[in-house]
């Protein structure tokens, strides 16, 4: 075989393609025989040309996995020795590298089996050899072996570290330094968090930085690139490997980022390191005071102009914007001031790139710094609106982008500036630049969506302008214009009706387009039809919807993912509009939804196969080596398909929710899909699955129990859904997904009742406790072993978690006390030193629990009351409102334990009735608290002082949920002819008259008032007549009507 194989190896390397193919076929046939191994070993050591020796090593690497177990011991020994000889004696670097790769594969099987004990000692010896080639190849092998026996090295790291450190500092050989650099990178993933090992890797950083600087100075940017890959690994490692070295890593990364003489790829890597640090190690940047130095480099990078031949995605200005965005999200308080300073100074710069950068920076930070930026909104808006008038297109484009970001993230505060903003946007829609127009449509869409009735004065000019633009603009502008029309319709709601017919007719023209370049516009038009239909309502559109539905269904034949995505959204809207009438479309649309949900997500795996790629020996890798496991380098996903699947998953939920029992034929397959998607790798799909699971349960519960198996099916689905939710609460790593699971659990608990959820209540309580302790997967923040005391949790998440407690209390009543006893202390820890919104959450939760749990709240009064009394004087109106509600419920249910606090409570509540209280909802809740206190302990209240102030604050202005408590209290005093209320009857009748004509008050409240007035008339008829006569006729008649009811 050896002789024939030699000829085939030579033939394979010939330039003649036919000869190569013939050789490849015969090599593949010979390679099935284990005897190919000694033959290849022979050529590895004896072939005259390096290419043949290298090819022999490549083939060995490919085939050794399947043949190694079959080789006799002497053949194995010969092979190992031949490889060692090749590594140490061969003069060709590619041959030595290829031989090292074979060693790596064999070691995977031989070292665990104890068949190659001399390998590691040989490598340690080789790495300290005086010969440069030996040191280099040993380091190469260390790197290669980590891919197959990496865990084995953990016990050797203490011995390996000084060798690697010495090689990193090898002044005689750049090749050795580079090989050492690669070896260090290979070992990082096998480092645990032991203190000695951590220090060992931190010690590498100065040498890595020195090598990188030398390589950059010598033009070896590909080597410096390895250093950034190592820093990337350090950042992502679960072991705390950064330490104080973060400062020098950041300094080096900033040097490279700012150096315009370097290639953009290496600068991009440097910027990316800063971005990763901001995302995963934000506390480190803050602790080492690196936020300002970073921004002092990143903000000026926004002023760079990319070369025409550069990839725009790699442009420094774009990458810098992403870093600033990430920093704003993770370090908002520390980012705002430096960026505002940069924007203020740069906005007046003579260079338009600086003015563009100034406005861009404000837009970029608007999401992360939204809460802090709202206080500076007027000043920032002044800069942006001024920039919309700049003579340079680039500045106007940046301004329209920033305005869109403000509109999206600075809600609702931005809406109060509509009188200034809308005219500026409308003016920008006339800009000669299509880019400015496109971004202005985006700004308009974001701004208008939540305007509500404030949009009405602008509705006609807006629609006229948008319709005209839609008729005359190029395709790309038509798409963003349609998005703006949709937002205007959503805000205007029924007021959009006069424009609906014209807009829908225009959309119909887009929904029949079939050319590839038109499908994006068709998708946007499909979305707009759904939005317009939702705005104007079922009565207006039901009759005209069928042709739109037919066009939407036909779009699935065009194989365009974005169109399918928007169409699923359209069907979700139509299902909500039509309700059970949507049932007729289920046989047509459900299979389309299932088809999208079952699409291949397009995962693409990039395999690191250095031999076949780098050396041109691709043909020899075509054998089926089932056991050869190349290293997976990267996984990517087609996001278009992901968005489509998310929209389809959402549609399943909407179909089930709005057609309920009619959805029964599709429940089983839907549930399979949602179970699968609830564990999907991407959070967007998991989120939609979590939402839709609740809707599936709603549909199942709506099925009439005509058969015995229906109730069993309902129990099974409840079991499946709650088990997924419990797992999600503790194990999912995305806060938004977990928050949605918590909200869904709260709804299910309230809707299904205690009997249904009793088997799960202890597990649900345990999951809630884990979240309150901030110990769930989504709450684990990388601290790198050093906690700087920062509070890091998500307000939306904790609001959702806190909603669980009142839900449990509602269905368990006083029995909830056993669970609440475990949850109380973790909940109270959020009151300090957490941000103000956490106190809001705690007080609101305590109030609702007190309301639902009843008398057991008395055991907690002494711990709750100091917090609630303090929050009654909070500077935040929401906190005062919640505290007032809470204090009322505690007084109502806290019994004697609350009584001793009445004096303090009354003094605190009195301030909420004064003219200094500007918030009507706060005053309404204060009135509710007083009413509850009077109802339970009237003898403990100085009614002669309290009642005049109490009644003067009525009628309720905003929080009508307090109406029953407040007016029932007054009615009770009247019906009992309490002496302290009688002098106030004229004022009370005046209040009652306003209540009975109010459309905001319930019929039950008005009926109770009628009974009280009827009682007054029957007892004090003559005295009541002038009081009633003094009322406006409409009020008097309404009051008389309710008083006459029986």
Image: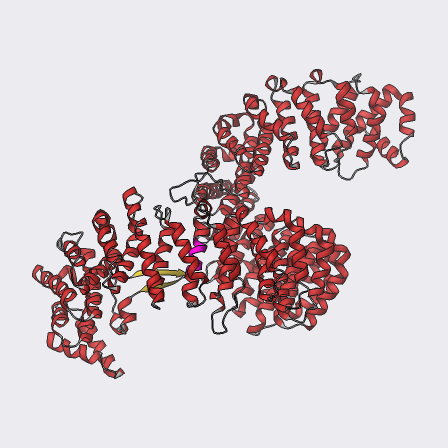
Image spot of residue 679 (x, y percent) = 43, 50
Image spot of residue 237 (x, y percent) = 35, 50
Q: Quadrant of the N terminus?
A: bottom left
Q: Nearer the viewer, residue 548 or 561?
A: 561
Q: Quadrant of the C terminus?
A: top right
Q: Residue at x 33, y 67 (%)?
A: 218
Q: Is residue 511 left or right of residue 291?
A: right
Q: Nearer the viewer, residue 291 or 558?
A: 291
Image spot of residue 400 (x, y percent) = 64, 62
Q: Nearer the viewer, residue 376 or 620?
A: 376
Q: Is residue 802 visible?
A: yes
Majority secondary structure of magenta residues: helix
For residue 398, which quarter of the picture?
bottom right
Stretch of the chain drawn in magenta: 270-276
Image spot of residue 437 (x, y percent) = 65, 67
Q: Is residue 409 magenta?
A: no
Q: Residue at x 26, y 57 (%)?
A: 169
Q: Is residue 1046 visible?
A: no
Q: Residue at x 32, y 57 (%)?
A: 208
């Amino acid at each position: 075989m050896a002789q024939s194989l030699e000829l085939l190896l030579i033939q394979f390397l010939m330039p003649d393609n036919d000869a190569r193919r013939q050789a490849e076929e015969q090599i593949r046939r010979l390679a099935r025989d284990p005897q190919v191994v000694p033959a290849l070993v022979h050529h590895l050591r004896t072939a005259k040309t390096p290419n043949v020796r290298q090819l022999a090593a490549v083939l060995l690497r490919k085939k050794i996995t399947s043949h190694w177990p079959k080789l006799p011991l002497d053949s194995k020994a010969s092979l190992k020795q031949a490889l060692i000889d090749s590594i140490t004696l061969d003069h060709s670097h590619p041959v030595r590298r290829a031989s090292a790769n074979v060693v790596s594969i064999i070691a995977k099987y031989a070292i665990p089996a104890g068949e190659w004990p001399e390998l590691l000692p040989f490598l340690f010896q080789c790495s300290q050899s005086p010969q440069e080639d030996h040191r280099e190849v040993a380091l190469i092998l260390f790197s290669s072996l980590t891919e197959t026996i990496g865990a084995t090295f953990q016990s050797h790291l203490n011995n390996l570290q000084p060798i690697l450190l010495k090689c990193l500092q090898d002044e005689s050989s750049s090749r050795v330094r580079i090989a050492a650099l690669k070896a260090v990178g290979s070992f990082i993933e096998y480092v645990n968090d032991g203190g000695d090992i951590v220090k060992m890797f931190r010690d590498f950083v100065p040498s890595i930085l020195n090598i990188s600087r030398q390589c950059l100075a010598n033009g070896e940017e590909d080597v410096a690139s390895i250093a950034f890959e190592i820093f990337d690994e350090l950042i992502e490692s679960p072991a705390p490997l950064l330490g104080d070295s973060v400062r020098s890593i950041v300094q080096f990364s900033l040097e490279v980022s700012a150096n315009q003489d370097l290639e953009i790829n290496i600068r991009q890597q440097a910027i990316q390191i800063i971005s990763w640090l901001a995302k995963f190690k934000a506390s480190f940047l803050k602790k080492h005071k690196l936020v300002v130095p970073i921004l002092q480099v990143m903000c000026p990078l926004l002023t760079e102009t990319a070369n025409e031949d550069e990839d725009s995605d790699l442009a420094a200005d774009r990458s810098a914007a992403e870093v600033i965005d990430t920093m704003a999200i993770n370090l908002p308080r520390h980012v705002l001031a430096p960026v505002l300073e940069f924007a203020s100074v740069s906005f007046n710069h003579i260079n338009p790139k600086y003015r563009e950068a100034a406005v861009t920076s404000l837009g970029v930070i608007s999401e992360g710094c939204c809460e802090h930026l709202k206080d500076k909104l007027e000043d920032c808006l002044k800069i942006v609106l001024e920039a919309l008038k700049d003579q340079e297109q680039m500045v106007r484009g940046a301004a329209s982008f920033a305005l869109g970001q403000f509109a999206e993230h600075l809600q609702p505060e931005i809406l109060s500036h509509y009188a200034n903003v809308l005219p500026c946007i409308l003016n920008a829609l006339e800009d000669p630049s299509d880019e400015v127009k496109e971004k202005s449509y985006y700004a308009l869409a974001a701004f208008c969506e939540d305007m509500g009735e404030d949009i009405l004065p602008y509705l006609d000019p807006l629609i006229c302008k948008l319709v005209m633009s839609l008729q005359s603009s190029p395709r790309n502008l038509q798409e963003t214009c349609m998005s703006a029309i949709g937002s205007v319709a959503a805000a205007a709601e029924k007021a959009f009706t006069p424009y609906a017919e014209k807009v829908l007719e225009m959309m119909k023209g887009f929904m029949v387009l079939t050319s590839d370049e038109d499908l994006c516009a068709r998708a946007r038009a499909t979305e707009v039809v759904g939005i317009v239909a939702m705005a104007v309502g079922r009565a207006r559109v039901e009759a005209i919807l069928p042709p739109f539905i037919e066009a939407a269904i036909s779009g699935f034949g065009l194989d365009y993912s974005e169109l399918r995505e928007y169409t699923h959204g359209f069907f979700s809207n139509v299902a909500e509009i039509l309700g059970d009438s949507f049932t007729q479309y289920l046989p047509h649309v459900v299979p389309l939804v299932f088809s999208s949900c079952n699409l291949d997500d397009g995962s693409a795996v990039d395999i690191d196969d250095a031999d076949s790629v780098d050396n041109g020996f691709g043909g020899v890798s075509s054998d089926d080596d089932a056991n050869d496991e190349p290293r997976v380098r990267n996984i990517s996903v087609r996001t278009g398909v992901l968005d489509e699947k998310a929209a389809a998953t959402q549609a399943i939920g909407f179909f089930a929710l709005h057609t309920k029992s009619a959805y029964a034929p599709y429940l089983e397959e839907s549930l399979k899909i949602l179970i699968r998607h609830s564990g999907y790798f991407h959070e967007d799909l998991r989120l939609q699955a979590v939402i839709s699971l609740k809707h599936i349960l709603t549909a199942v519960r709506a099925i009439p129990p005509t058969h015995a198996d229906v109730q069993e099916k309902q129990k099974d689905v409840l079991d499946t859904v709650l088990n997924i939710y419990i797992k999600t609460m503790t194990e999912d790593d995305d806060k938004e997904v977990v928050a949605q699971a918590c909200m869904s659990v709260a709804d299910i608990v309230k809707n299904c009742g205690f009997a249904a959820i009793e088997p799960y209540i202890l597990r649900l309580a345990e999951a809630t406790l884990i979240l309150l302790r901030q110990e769930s997967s989504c709450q684990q923040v990388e601290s790198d072993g050093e906690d700087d005391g920062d509070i890091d949790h998500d307000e939306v998440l904790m609001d959702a978690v806190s909603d669980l407690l009142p839900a449990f209390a509602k269905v368990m009543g006083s029995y909830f006390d056993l669970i609440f006893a475990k949850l109380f202390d973790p909940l109270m820890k959020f009151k300090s030193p957490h941000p103000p919104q956490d106190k809001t959450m705690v007080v609101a939760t305590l109030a609702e629990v007190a309301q639902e749990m009843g008398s057991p709240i008395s055991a907690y009064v002494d711990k709750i009351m100091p917090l609630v009394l303090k929050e009654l004087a909070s500077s935040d109106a929401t906190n005062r409102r919640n505290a007032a509600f809470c204090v009322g419920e505690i007084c109502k249910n806290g019994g004697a334990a609350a009584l001793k606090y009445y004096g303090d409570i009354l003094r605190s509540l009195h301030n909420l009735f004064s003219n200094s209280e500007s918030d009507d909802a706060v005053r309404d809740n204060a009135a509710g608290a007083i009413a509850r206190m009077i109802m339970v302990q009237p003898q403990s209240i100085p009614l002669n002082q309290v009642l005049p102030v109490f009644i003067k604050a009525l009628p309720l202005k905003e929080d009508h949920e307090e109406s029953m408590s407040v007016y029932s209290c007054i009615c009770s005093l009247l019906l009992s002819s309490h002496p302290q209320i009688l002098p106030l009857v004229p004022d009370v009748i005046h209040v009652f008259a306003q209540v009975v004509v109010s459309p905001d008050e319930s019929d039950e409240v008005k009926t109770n008032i009628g009974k009280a007035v009827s009682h007054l008339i029957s007892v004090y008829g003559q005295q009541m007549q002038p009081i009633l006569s003094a009322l406006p006729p409409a009020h008097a008649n309404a009051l008389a009507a309710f008083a006459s009811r029986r």
